[in-house]
């Protein structure tokens, strides 16, 4: 029932954490020397949902203004408590700069670690191998770091 679809083919480079109690990815021995996809998934503790969601608007603004992010989407698997994000970056350095630079995302990471806001979480990084289909009427070229097709 969708108007369009897009498939991003990936090779897992690293993964830590669980998704529904399982480790869904087997990292390969590869070097991330080009575009990097990041997948995060968390089950937020119900009593911590307010603290978690209070941080979301500032993080969304920051990633929306980052000139390096090639693609991004947030997915509510189970609204409010099971959340996932998927983003593609030109390289590991620009992804790490966003994640760890002083700002709303780094602050949220600290709060997650200190406050134990999640029942379960997963952080995975992938090499981007190919893209098929379209998003917003275009097939973003996510396999080349100079392609800054922002979505």
Image (cartoon, rainbow, N blue to C red):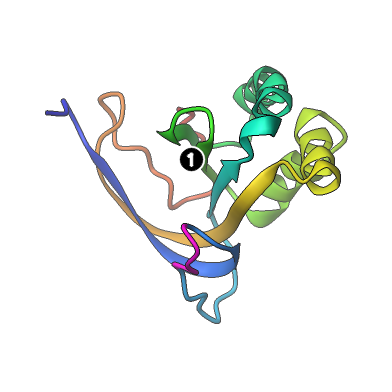
Q: Give the position of the N terminus as an image quadrant.
A: top left
Q: Residue at x 66, y 55 (%)?
A: 92
Magenta segment: 20-24
* 24 vs 104: above or below: below
Extreme residue in the front direction: 47
Q: Nearer the viewer, residue 27 or 150?
A: 27
Q: Nearer the viewer, residue 5 or 52?
A: 52
Query: Mark 1, residues whose alpha carbon is within 10 Å: few (<14), some, or many (≥20)?
Result: some
Q: Secondary structure at mark 1?
A: loop
Extreme residue in the left direction: 1
- Predominant SS along the magenta part: loop
Q: Magenta stretch containing residue 87, yes or no?
A: no
Identify residue for label 1: 147
Q: Residue at x 65, y 24 (%)?
A: 53
* 94 vs 140: above or below: below
Residue 22 % position (x, y): 47, 67
Residue 104 % position (x, y): 79, 28
Residue 60 % position (x, y): 62, 23
Extreme residue in the bottom direction: 29
Q: How many marks?
A: 1
Image quadrant in which you'd find residue 49: top right
Q: Give the position of the C terminus as an image quadrant.
A: top left
Q: Residue at x 56, y 59 (%)?
A: 124
Query: Is 1 left or right of 117, judged from the image as shown?
Result: left
Image quadrant in which you'd find residue 139: top left
């Amino acid at each position: 029932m969708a108007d369009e679809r897009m498939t991003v083919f990936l090779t897992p480079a690293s993964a830590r954490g669980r998704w529904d109690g399982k480790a869904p990815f087997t990292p390969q021995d590869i070097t991330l020397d080009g575009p990097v996809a990041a997948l995060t998934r968390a089950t937020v503790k119900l009593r911590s949902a307010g603290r978690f969601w209070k941080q979301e608007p500032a993080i969304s603004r920051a990633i929306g203004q980052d000139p390096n992010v090639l693609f991004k989407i947030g997915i509510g698997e189970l609204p409010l408590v099971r959340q996932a994000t998927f983003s593609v970056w030109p390289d590991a350095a620009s992804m790490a700069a966003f994640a760890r630079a002083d700002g709303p995302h780094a602050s949220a990471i600290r709060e997650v670690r200190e406050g134990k806001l999640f029942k379960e979480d997963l952080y995975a990084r992938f090499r981007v191998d190919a893209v098929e289909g379209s998003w917003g009427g275009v097939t973003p070229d996510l396999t080349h770091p100079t392609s800054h097709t922002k979505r």
